[in-house]
Image: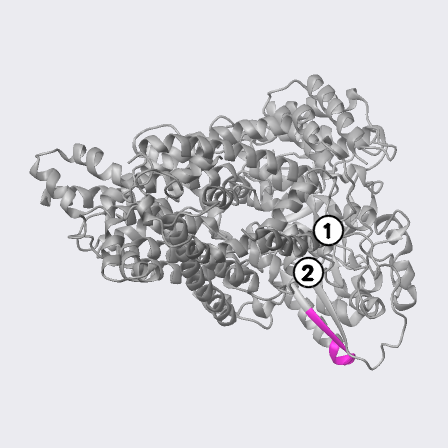
Amino acid sequence: MTHQSAQAAGGQTPGSEGKRRKRKPGSLVAYLYISPWLIGFIVLTLVPFVASFIYSFTDYNMVRKQTFVGLANYIEIFTKDPVFVQSLRVTLLYVVIAVPLKLIVALLVAMLLNVKMRGISIYRTIYYLPSILGGSVAVSVLWRFMFMREGLVNEMLSYFSLPPVNWLGDPNLALFTITLLPVWEFGSSMVLFLAGLKQVPAELYEASKVDGASRVRTFFSVTLPLLTPIVLFNLIMQMINAFQQFTAAFVITDGGPMKSTYLYGMMLYDNAFQFFKMGYASAQSWILFLIILVFTFVLFKTSNRWAHYEDGGDGK
Amino acid sequence: MKNRNWRKAVALPLVAMLATALTACGSDESGGKAPEGKTDGEKVTLRFSWWGSEVRHKALLEAIDIYTEANPNVVIEPEYGGFEGYYQKLVTQFAGGTAPDLTPLSVDWIDEIAVKGDLVLDLNTLKDYLNLDAFDKEFLDSYAVYDGKLVGLPMGANGMITLYNKEFFDRFDIAHDTVWDWETIHTIGKQVHEKDANAYLLGMFDYRIFLQPFVNQLTGNQWIQNDKTVGFAEEDVTKAFSYYQQLIADGVIQPVAESSLYPDMADNLQWQNGNIGMMFTLASTIAKVKTYTPGVDVAMFPVPSDAKTSAVLVNPSNPLAINKKSKHPEEAAKFASWLLTSEEASLVLKDVFSVPVVKANADKLVEEGLIDPTVAKAVDLALSNPGEPVNGLSSNQELNQIAQDILERVAFGKVAPDAAASELTERLKDKLALIK
Amino acid sequence: MRRRKLWTVIVLSVFSILFLYPLLWLISSSFKPNADIFSSISLWPREFVWDAYARGWQGVGRTNFSTFFGNTLLLVIPVVVLTAASSLLVAYGFARFKFRGKGLLFTLMISTLMLPDAVIMIPRYLLFKEFNWLNTYLPFYVPALLAVNAFFVFLLVQFLRGIPRDLDEAAVIDGCNSFGILVRVLIPLAAPALVSVCIFQFIWTWNEFFTALIYINSVSKYTVALGLRMVLDNEGAVNWNQVMAMSVVTILPCIAVFFMAQKYFVEGIATTGLKG
């Protein structure tokens, strides 16, 4: 990421014209505010990061002394590792399906739940339940129960006289089914959309109503623009998480059938802890880091055009 | 700005911290030699960690209480939990030099932790504190000595057997005392499926229960030889793959698209519902299987009459190892020895680690009816015709995963047996060249 | 308007089965005999087992779930409070000030989320070991105090930036310093976002298994997430109805917290009249 894109997210450019009058007496105060993070970064985060970067050039395996191997890990990844290619392919597909699907569902449900009505809090809680249960020990069993051949979903299909589907056993379908688990746990994105909707000033709706705009148009002309900072946040965070997704595949299909759900996170885990190749896993992690960085950069870049900030940041 | 000095002030501790993060493990000052004697009277604290289910936790806690009561100078801190994450935590602790004094090792980890990592003591160096004579020497030599080192005291004996559903066998008129080989599996399995299209003799095959022993029986060699060459010819694996595809085609095995969801057969719904007749599994899993399917019995693993070796897997159930960095290795050894050889302890532990290796204790438990007779029978069967102990390279998980992946594609019919065999050989050779 | 509400209720009710089913299944499993849990999808137990809760609560050996719950509260509450406070301060610094290196620092902060945990775990463990933090809750408290999780900072930055700056300026005219602006103007307006931070951090820390597993050795310091999994062996027999029962008990506080907190999205301090 360059400075530009980051500033798009984090406020004005130091020299942006017209805002000079705002310069506060010294940026010392600002450093004071961010100092907890700064200290945390230097003391707690930086060292592990640099260490893992160095590991990526070694054959570190956690239980023996490591030796420096230069670029050997990276060369092996790109030239001799068919599993890496497969896993990357699966992961990209996963990200492309899961992220938009989850955000659209979360936004739709948040719109539905953003009404003043008795009992709405119960519905909100119900729709958040999967996000609470996500960490439960039983979730893998449960998911199998829902999607196995004799499971709940197929039973529901049979009510509509539809044939049963082999949701998790068919290598062409398993990834899609796995994707539904995190989509179903859309609760945290939904909560943020709800919180964002609360920030939309009521007068704007009223103004729009006075103009006689339809609900759909109000959504696109009033609500959505004001929600863009939250959309950007959810988009970036969900994408980062999706690239590192591990649980969904690990607990339900264990990467199978035929590696069709072998997500990048699982490959890292296997290399690091099953195969004792921490150096190799570190190299793969840094490759993933770069991939995520590029995607994030692109999102931030394009967000200059569509994200709308009330604080008068860039593009205003 | 005056940030020059500031930078330096930050940079120095950073470098120091990084250094500690990088010099993770390996040998250091304290490694190797243990401080001698003079522990009598002095309070000694030992950290003992393990994984397992409720019965195992309760039994071990009780055993610890008995021991510490008799040895008031010893405090044993139990650190126990489920299996999930146990191994990662253990490896992390070894990397940090904070591993417990005593821990069981799963057979899969021995090669890395005990042999290559050299992180646990060779118990031969502590034999003054251990009652090694209580064990069958041959068993110890075959299954607990790696690279000349006694890596741990076996907590129990474990072996691969055929486990079958008695009701299923009766339903399809299969004799309980059938002596299984790959031939009979095919014929009987085919008949079963012809009688009932929803019934299958077997669930799923994987590398460990099928490919490795099947090929081993053909060749008599280790899967991967000690000199880092593959121990089989392409025809051998081709035979295994064709056989597997034949079983699937004839309905002997449940379709993989259904069984692949359950890597652990005990969880397979069709098995639980009695539509699958048998499985190959380790004796240690019998307790779990029985919670869902109580009516089971065991038989010998399939061994053809012309097999070069039985290939029946026998292994020590989680040898109990002593951390090389332990400050009190003698005390740890004394406790380990008591735990695994004394009759007192064995009456408490019963079969929570499968059947005890110490013969006298095992007999006593059987006699008193304290051991599940199915488990005892299973271990007896496996030990009556054991295959060669599997060497380290053949239990290398990365290599095994390659075999497993290809086996799965064979099962899905995505690759022909001969093509699969040559791909397998090729990829194993590639990986072996990279393994140090 | 009324028709719209009616439709909302109908749609929400129809789909709610997909979201309620897991909880109902969990509850029903806690009353089933062990052998039935995985072999029948029926929610109604064929035969009721009543003692799973009582026996599950006992835990194993010397510690029971009272200890685990106590420990979890001791862990979660400070973490939630510290996270909210530190993340807000840092977010305020990033959202409302200009300073040298801001772009770079912001980029660094977001990028700390991009490296998978699997490879940071060991060096971080070694570091915390140097600090003597093993087998304590400090590996949770200190990162919370120092706003190490960039997720929360970024979240609050995005919300603060959605609040018009004119309001700050009005407060300056009233004689507020920067901290005064934060407390008097921004905190009330960002309440829904802060509540979200607290909900997330509460539930995530409550359920956090892996970090707790790595750093906590003594069973007497186990949290509920560790307690729940401590009897799950890969081979041995597991009393699943007890595990399910304790899972139900364990998620109840999370449901309660969410239920109580979500009202801030209904009555969230209205921005009415503030927009210039």
- Asked whether B71 falls inside the magenta stretch, the response is yes
In the drawing, what numbered circle is on residue B50? 2
Mark 1: few, some, or many residues within 10 Å (few <14, many ≥20)? some
- The answer to whether C70 appears left or right of B19 in the picture is left
Callout 2 crowding tier (Cα within 10 Å): few <14, some 14–19, many ≥20: many
What residue is pinned by disc 1? B106
SS for callout 1 = loop
What segment is highlighted magenta in the picture?
B68-77
Res B255 seen here: no
CA–CA distance between discs 2 and 1?
10 Å
Q: Mark on residue B191?
A: none
At 26% from the left and 40% from the top, the residue drawn is A226
**Residue C257 on image: x %, y %:** 35, 61
Q: Residue lying at the far front in this picture: please name it.
A: B1
How far across and down, in percent of the image, does residue B405 sit?
A: 65, 30
> Quick check: B394 above or below A116?
above
Q: Quadrant of the N terminus of chain C?
A: top left
Q: Residue at x 65, y 34 (%)?
A: B205
Q: Nearer the viewer, residue A301 or C173?
A: C173
Image mark 2: chain: B
Q: Mark 2 vs mark 1: same chain?
A: yes
Q: Earlier in the sequence, mark 2 or mark 1?
A: 2
- Colouring scheme, one of rainbow, by chain, secondary structure, one colour: one colour
Q: Within the magenta stretch, is there residue A213? A: no
Circle 1 chain: B
Q: Who is closer to the viewer here, B130 or B30?
A: B30
Q: Type of residue at label 2? A: Trp
Q: Position of residue A54 (x, y in %)?
A: 69, 42
Is residue B218 visible from the viewing direction of this image?
yes
Residue A65 is left or right of residue C25, and the answer is right
| Tag 1: amino acid | Ser
